[in-house]
């Protein structure tokens, strides 16, 4: 049995040591906001925070997670979608199909924790999640908004007419 700190709660999980953290979160714990996309840590749909670092949960076996590790999923980012990134995502209307968005939001939140005022280049370098719908410009706009607004000369443009 594994003991995990997920969204601030200790959880006991009965799963094989080789089970990817993604499936532990979704199937054993019931937190389905973290999505399966590729299974090889390339797309980012499965992104979570482990000790304040964005990680791809599909490639992390349960055996590598310690009880002292702090895991945060999209459900634990804020109780009522009040995190600045979540609020910016809604204002900018980032999602199209929405499938990748929980991973995108987790990556953006991790970026802003490390770099509260990122440039376009910083955002492009940190946001390596794949969006099949191509909402990358809206992602960049929302990251700037969550950081307090778009910097001068930014290519971030709102796509929905709402004020940034």
Image: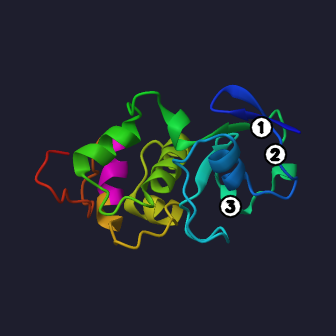
Residue corresponding to mark 2: 65
Query: Answer yes or no: do the residues labelled 2 and 1 have beta carbons within 8 Å?
Result: yes
Packing grade of label 1 (10 A; few <14, some 14-19, many >=20) is some
Q: Is residue 147 visible?
A: no
Residue at the spot x=41%, y=34% of the render? 83
Task: Tell me the CA gap for discs 2 and 3.
Answer: 13 Å
Residue at the spot x=83%, y=48% of the render? 15
Render colour scheme: rainbow
Residue corresponding to mark 1: 69
Q: Position of residue 64 (x, y in %)?
A: 85, 51
Q: Which residues are magenta?
A: 139-146
Residue at the spot x=58%, y=62% of the render? 36
Residue at the spot x=32%, y=57% of the render? 95
Query: Answer yes or no: do the residues labelled 2 and 3 have beta carbons within 8 Å?
Result: no
Q: Could you tell which of marks 2 and 3 lies nearer the N-terminus? A: 3
Q: Position of residue 45 (x, y in %)?
A: 53, 60
The kind of secondary structure element at disc 2 is loop
The kind of secondary structure element at disc 1 is loop
Packing grade of label 2 (10 A; few <14, some 14-19, many >=20) is some
**The C terminus lies in quadrant:** top left
């Amino acid at each position: 049995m594994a003991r995990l700190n997920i969204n601030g709660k200790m959880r006991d999980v009965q799963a094989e040591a080789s089970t990817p953290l993604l499936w532990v979160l979704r199937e054993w714990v019931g937190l389905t906001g973290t999505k399966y996309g590729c299974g090889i840590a390339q797309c980012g749909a499965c992104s979570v925070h482990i000790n304040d670092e964005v990680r791809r949960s599909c490639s992390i076996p349960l055996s590598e997670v310690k009880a002292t590790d702090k895991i945060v999923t999209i459900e634990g980012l804020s109780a009522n979608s009040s995190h600045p990134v979540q609020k910016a995502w809604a204002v900018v209307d980032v999602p199209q199909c929405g499938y990748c968005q929980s991973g995108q939001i987790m990556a953006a939140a991790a970026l802003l924790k490390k770099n509260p005022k990122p440039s376009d280049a910083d955002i492009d370098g940190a946001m390596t999640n794949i969006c099949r719908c191509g909402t990358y410009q809206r992602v960049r706009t929302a990251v700037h908004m969550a950081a307090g607004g778009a910097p001068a000369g930014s290519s971030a443009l709102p796509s929905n007419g709402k004020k940034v």
